[in-house]
Image: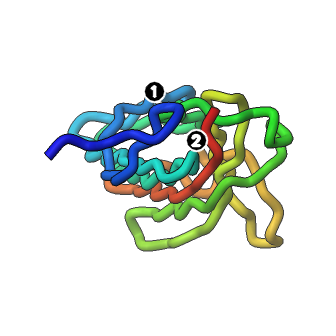
């Protein structure tokens, strides 16, 4: 059965779709596992993204492309938080963080330090990144 569409190409019966994000300051490493899916309903995009890093990953001030551009006029870019992220070390240290809208087409991942302050993720913050470390994010935003 084909999917019907409302105005502006918004599906009437939304289904999860895969997408391949592009990254800034993130190299997943050899053997990494990546899952990137989103669903659209009534102009709201909900994203589920997870990565298990492979060998020799590089992690810095991570930015991820969005599957559909955001209605950037609705947000304070570089400030508004769209959702959460879990940063999980291969020793099972589990830390939280924020997904912040950066531009109409990208989000920025921030960790939360032990005092509750959002901080830029680096190669050593919140821990030294290595094989089998995980990043899991869920966030939602209004599309263009």
CA distance for labels 2 and 1: 19 Å
**Can you give x and y, in whole percent of width and height, for residue 88 in the image?**
47, 64
**Dot 1 alpha-carbon crowd within 10 angstroms: few under 14, some 14 to 19, many 20 or more:** few
Disc nearest the viewer among 2 and 1? 1
Above/below status of 66 relative to 13: above
Identify which residue, 107 or 1, lies in the foreground. Answer: 1
Sequence-first tag of 2 and 1: 1
**Can you give x and y, in whole percent of width and height, for residue 42 in the image?**
54, 51
Above/below status of 30 relative to 49: above
**Dots 2 and 1: beta carbons under 8 Å?**
no
**Can you give x and y, in whole percent of width and height, for residue 141 in the image?**
63, 48
Q: In the visual, does 91 lie left or right of 75?
A: left
Numbered disc 2: secondary structure:
loop
In which quadrant will I find the C terminus?
top right
Disc 1 designates what residue?
Answer: 22
For the point 74% across and 54% down, the residue is 81
The label on residue 92 is none
For the point 71% across and 41% down, the residue is 101
Above/below status of 15 relative to 70: below
Does residue 131 appear anywhere in the picture? no
For the point 67% across and 57% down, the residue is 98
Identify which residue, 114 or 137, lies in the foreground. Answer: 137
Q: In the visual, does 73 lie left or right of 131?
A: right
For the point 19% across and 41% down, the residue is 2
**Can you give x and y, in whole percent of width and height, for residue 64 in the image?**
54, 35
**Dot 2 alpha-carbon crowd within 10 angstroms: few under 14, some 14 to 19, many 20 or more:** some
Disc 2 designates what residue?
Answer: 123
Does residue 126 appear anywhere in the picture? yes
Q: How many marks?
A: 2
- When asked about the image quadrant of residue 107, the answer is top right
Numbered disc 1: secondary structure:
loop
């Amino acid at each position: 059965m084909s999917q019907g569409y409302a105005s502006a190409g918004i599906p009437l019966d939304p289904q999860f779709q895969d997408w391949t994000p592009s990254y800034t300051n993130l190299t997943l490493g050899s053997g990494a596992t990546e899952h990137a899916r989103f669903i659209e309903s009534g102009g709201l995009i909900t994203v589920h993204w997870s990565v298990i890093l492979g060998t020799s990953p590089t992690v810095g001030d991570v930015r991820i492309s969005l599957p559909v551009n955001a209605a950037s006029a609705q947000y304070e870019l570089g400030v508004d938080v769209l959702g959460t992220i879990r940063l999980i070390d291969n020793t099972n240290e589990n830390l939280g963080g924020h997904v912040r809208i950066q531009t109409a087409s990208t989000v920025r991942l921030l960790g939360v330090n032990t005092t509750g302050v959002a901080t830029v993720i680096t190669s050593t913050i919140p821990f030294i990144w290595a094989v089998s470390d995980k990043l899991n994010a869920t966030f939602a935003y209004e599309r263009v």
